Amino acid sequence: MSSTLLLVLKIYFVIFASMIGSFLNVVIYRVPLGQNIVFPRSKCPNCSFQLSWFLNIPVLSFLFLKGRCYKCKQKISFQYPLVEFLCAGAGYFFFPNDFQVESIVSSFFYFATFCVFLCHLFIDIKHRLLPDSLNIFLLLVFLAFSIWRFGWVHSTLGGMVGFLMPLSITWLFYKLRGQIGLGGGDIKLFGILGLFLGVKGIIYNIFLSCWIGAIVGGSLILFKRMKKSESLAFGPYIILAASVQMFFPSQFQKFVEYVMGRY
Ligand SMILES: [Zn+2]
C-alpha cells in the first residue's frame, strides 16, 4: 500500500476518532444519570437548546463559539473539547502501521480500551462510580483480545488474581477497620485488567495505582485541598497505571527494571 494512501486513511481515522470523542462526551454525561446515549440529540445543559450539526463539530465548534453556548452564552465545560482532542490523538497514536489482520485488531483493541478508560476517568472523578455497562463492554473486549493474543492460562490466572487480590485486601480492611476501602467497580476493573496484564502485570498495576493514589491523595491533603477523612475515587489511579503499562509497555519495563535495581 502506498504511503500517500496510508496518510489519507490516517487523517480520516483521526477525524473519525474526534467524532467518537464527541460521542464519549455524551456517554460521560448520560450513563451515570441512567439516560439513553443515542436519543435525544445533544442539547445545552443550561438552556436545553438543541445543537445542530455545525455546532457539534469536534473541537472546532468549541473554538468557534469561544467556549460558550450559541444561544444562552453559558460557559461550556472545557471537558468537551479535551475529550474530543484526546480521542483524535489516540486515533493518530493507535492507527495501524500496516494492514495485517493482527495490526488492525490490535489498533481496534487499544483504541476501544482508551475510549472506555477516558469515560471511566471522567465519570469516576465526578460521580465516584465506574458504571457496570462500561465494565461489561471492557470485559468482552479484553476477554476476546487477551485469549486471542496470550491464551487461556495467562488470561484466566491474571483475571483471577486481579479480582481476588483486591477483594481479599478490601475484606481484610473491612474486618480490621470496619471501613470499605475499594468500591465494587474498582475490584471488577482490576479483574478485567488482569485478563490482559497477566498475574505479574496486574500485581504491578495494584501497587502502582496505590502509589499514584498515595502521592495524589497526600499532596491534596498537604495543600489543604482535601480533608484527611475524605476518600478519593480510586478508579483514576487504576486507569493511569494501566495506561502506562498498556500504551507505553517498553518505557514501563525500563521503569520496573530501574526500580528493581537491575537497570
Ligand atoms: Zn445554552
Image (tube, helix red, strand yellow):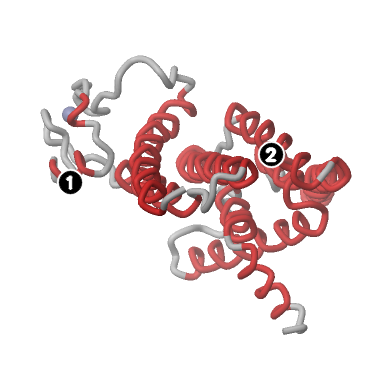
Q: Residue 48 bears which disc, if any?
A: none
Residue 41 in sight from this viewpoint? yes
Can residue 175 be seen in this snapshot? no
* Nearer the observer, 171 or 123: 123
State whether residue 89 is above or below residue 249.
Answer: above
Q: Residue at x 58, y 62 (%)?
A: 248
Left/right placement of residue 45 relative to residue 183 reads: left
Q: Quadrant of ligand 1?
A: top left
Q: Earlier in the sequence, mark 2 or mark 1?
A: 1
Residue 142 x/y as whole percent: 69, 39
Q: Is residue 168 left or right of residue 105?
A: right
For the point 82% across and 54% down, which residue is it? 199
Q: Residues within 10 Å of mark 1 (few under 14, many from 20)?
A: few
Residue at numbered disc 1: 63
Q: Is residue 107 above or below residue 131?
A: below
Q: Are marks 2 and 1 in contact (CB under 8 Å)?
A: no
Expressed as whole percent of the image width and height from the top left, the position of residue 176 reads: 83, 51
Give the residue type that dot 2 points to: Phe
Q: Quadrant of residue 27?
A: top left
- The residue that label 2 is drawn on is 142
Q: Name the one closer to the observer, 129 or 146.
A: 146
Give the residue furthest to the front.
2
Q: Is residue 128 above or below residue 95?
A: above
For this view, does 40 lie left or right of residue 238?
Answer: left
Q: Amino acid type of disc 1? A: Leu
Element at badge 1?
A: helix
Residue at (46% x, 24% y) in the render: 33
Query: For the residue labelled by badge 2, is the local secondary structure a helix, a strand or a loop?
Result: helix
Q: Position of residue 177 (x, y in %)?
A: 77, 51
